[in-house]
Amino acid sequence: MAISSIGSIDLGNAIKNIDSSISEAVNDTGKTSFESIFDSAVNMIKETEELTNKAEEEEMKYALGYDNTLELLVAQNKANTSLSFVVAVRDKVLDAYSEIMNMQF
């Protein structure tokens, strides 16, 4: 594995994907479609699960002696970053939900 492949960890790209998903969720009237935002969240969770599974596979390869430390660390960092991002989004959604529930009508 070449060291240049470490550069593939790109949070900017993930943020652009989320921004484009939210942009697609906005229709012509300026209102957001809950379904498309929910689909984006589900896709983020699926991607995080895939990265976590990949990290687990790399751990097994490393334990068996087939992989080097660099590939293991890259896979673990990608999974950790993705999970941290999903947790941050979840926290913001829960904050927004509790704020809405505390509104008086």
Image (spheres, rainbow, N blue to C red):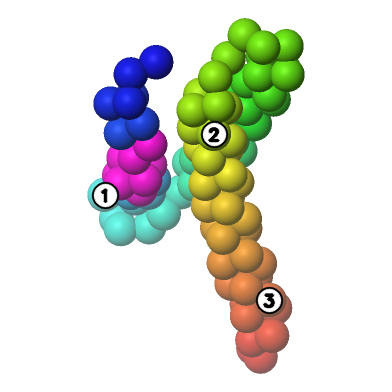
Where 56 sits versus 104, above or below?
Answer: above
Q: CA distance from mark 2 to mark 1?
A: 44 Å
Q: Are marks 3 and 2 in contact (CB under 8 Å)?
A: no
Q: Identify the element where label 2 is drawn.
A: helix
Q: CA distance from mark 3 to mark 2?
A: 37 Å
Residue beneath the point at 37% across and 45% down: 11
Identity, as a three-letter code, of the amino acid under mark 1: Asp
Identity, as a three-letter code, of the amino acid under mark 3: Ser
Q: Residue 65 falls in which quadrant of the image?
A: top right
Disc number for residue 28: 1
User: Can see residue 48?
Assistant: yes
Q: Residue 57 falls in which quadrant of the image?
A: top right
Is residue 24 or residue 11 the one in the foreground? 11
- Residue at numbered disc 3: 98
Q: Main secondary structure of the magenta part?
A: helix
Q: Residues within 10 Å of mark 1 (few under 14, many from 20)?
A: few
Side (left or right) of 89 relative to 25: right
Of the image marks 2 and 1, the number of the one nearer the N terminus: 1
